[in-house]
Amino acid sequence: MLRQFVILTVFVLSVAVNLGLTLRDPSWLAVPAMLIGWYLADLLSGLIHMYMDYRPCTQGKRLNDIFFYEGSRESKEYLDMLRDRMATIGPFERISYDFKNHHPRPDALGRRALWRLIGSTVIVAALPLSIAGNVAGWLWPVPGWIFAGLVAFLIGGGFAQYFHGSLHRQDNPWFITAMRRTGLLMSPAAHQIHHDTLQRDFATNCGWSNPVINRLFNALRARGMLDESGLVPSA
Ligand SMILES: [Zn+2]
Ligand SMILES: [Zn+2]
């Protein structure tokens, strides 16, 4: 718990420093830069989601046992099996499993704690990138609008799974509702199209990049890639 709190605090402080570097050198270019950063975060989250949905689970990890478990998911048998299987896989495999598992059980994603949703993204990508921005701003006279784009990208990318989780939850903080109204976040109805088809609209932040990702998905499928068998774990 302490480790999680420290990492999240350092991340928030580091993003705040990047925001300060934006304000040090104000420019109207900050506005388009932030929109581009927000778009790129949406695009990246959608591409990762598409890849993780269709990437076959590693053979021999027997994730199918927990995926297709028919009894109570609060039973000791299931929880023991869950702990056992999760102990044998790394964070990458777990993220891939979580994406597949959220298709039949979307509400489970909405119930996850913040750290479970964003922890690995922050550690592996968002925090190192944010600190790299701090260092660059300290060493060189980087224009402020670059940091504006970076801050939007860090928030959109770092919190992507939190925003996705909010689409599967009834009670959300006020800023989620406000961001939906302004179009900075997509609506649950728009995301439902992904769940109904599993073949389109993989981006889950604002969804601005979905037309591009959908075209890529169709092109890859036409070449025989992204086979449907990857959507569920095998033995
Ligand atoms: Zn999906
Ligand atoms: Zn979803």
Image (spheres, rainbow, N blue to C red):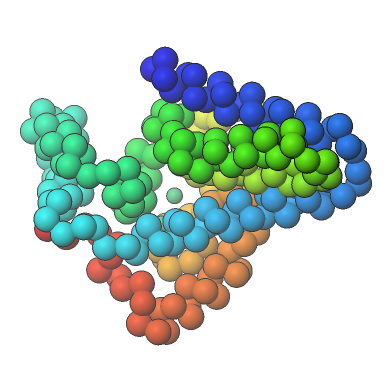
Query: Residue 208 vs residue 230: left or right?
Result: right
Q: Quadrant of the C terminus?
A: bottom left
Please give the name of the residue rendered at 32% of the width and 62% of the height, measured from the top-left corner: 55
Residue that extends furthest to the bottom in the rendered view of this protein: 223
Q: Quadrant of the N terminus?
A: top left
Residue that extends furthest to the left in the rendered view of this protein: 77
- Residue 212: percent from left, percent from top: 60, 70
**Foreground: 177 or 3?**
3
**Foreground: 152 or 166?**
152
Residue that extends furthest to the top in the rendered view of this protein: 2
- Residue 109: percent from left, percent from top: 39, 39
Instruction: Examine the image and state in which quarter residue 151 appears.
Output: top right
**Foreground: 55 or 177?**
55
Please give the name of the residue rendered at 70% of the width and 27% of the height, measured from the top-left corner: 16
- Residue 111: percent from left, percent from top: 39, 32
Query: Residue 151 vs residue 76: left or right?
Result: right
Residue that extends furthest to the front in the rendered view of this protein: 139
Query: Residue 189 vs residue 28: left or right?
Result: left
Query: Relative to residue 232, is residue 206 depicted above or below?
Result: above
Please give the name of the residue rendered at 74% of the width and 33% of the height, measured from the top-left corner: 138
- Residue 200: percent from left, percent from top: 48, 66
**Foreground: 80 or 87?**
87
Residue 37 visible to the viewer: yes
Q: How many marks?
A: 0
Please give the name of the residue rendered at 73% of the width and 54% of the height, measured from the top-left corner: 36
Query: Residue 53 vs residue 170: left or right?
Result: left
Residue 189 visible to the viewer: no
